[in-house]
Amino acid sequence: MKRNRRGKHVTPDSAARILRKACLRVGIEGASTHSFRKTVLTQMSDSGIPLRVIAEVSGHRDLRQLQAYLEVREEQVLGAVSSLSMLSFVEDSSTEDEKEKFPDTSPSLQQ
């Protein structure tokens, strides 16, 4: 917890009050400590910081709690789906002898 000019701890309520006053001064409406926290955690996730690290830094006990703060945008979903197109089927280059020794027991994708 940060300390104020008098050396006392800044409470969550006083931090929220300070933020509201600063936002009003510069014309930002609807901002809160919660919205700032949500934005920062989402930006950390967007930057590729592992979710376990973000959870630790933000004080969340588990990833389920953290999920409530992270925003998922349409372009992120589309990007994740399009990255799957980079995956391609790899042909089996095993020799007949290797195939006999190590038969394929995985379910077939072809019907």
Image (tube, helix red, strand yellow):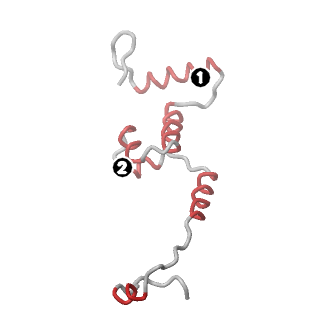
Residue at 56% x, 69% y is 88
Residue at 38% x, 38% y is 57
Of 34 and 98, nearer the camera is 98
Q: Quadrant of residue 9?
A: top left
Location of mark 1 (residue): 23
Q: Quadrant of residue 83?
A: bottom right
Q: Where residue 2 appears, x then y in whole percent?
A: 37, 21
Give the farthest residue toward the right. 27
Q: Where residue 13 appears, x then y in whole percent?
A: 43, 25
| CA distance separating discs 2 and 1 | 31 Å
**In terms of sequence position, does the residue under pointer 2 or pointer 1 come before the other?**
1
Q: Quadrant of the C terminus?
A: bottom right
Q: Secondary structure under badge 2?
A: loop
**Of discs 2 and 1, which sits in the foreground?**
2
Residue at 63% x, 53% y is 74
Disc ID at residue 95: none
Q: Where residue 25 appears, x then y in whole percent?
A: 62, 17
Q: Secondary structure under badge 1?
A: helix
Image position of 2 (left or right of 45) = left
* Label 2 environment density (alpha carbons within 10 Å; few <14, some 14–19, many ≥20): few
Residue at 48% x, 48% y is 68
Disc ID at residue 62: 2
Callout 1 amino acid: Cys
Image position of 16 (left or right of 57) = right
Q: Where residue 95 appears, x then y in whole percent?
A: 43, 84
Of 52 and 104, nearer the camera is 104
**Residue 43, placed above or below residue 20:** below
Image position of 29 (left or right of 49) = right
Callout 2 amino acid: Asp
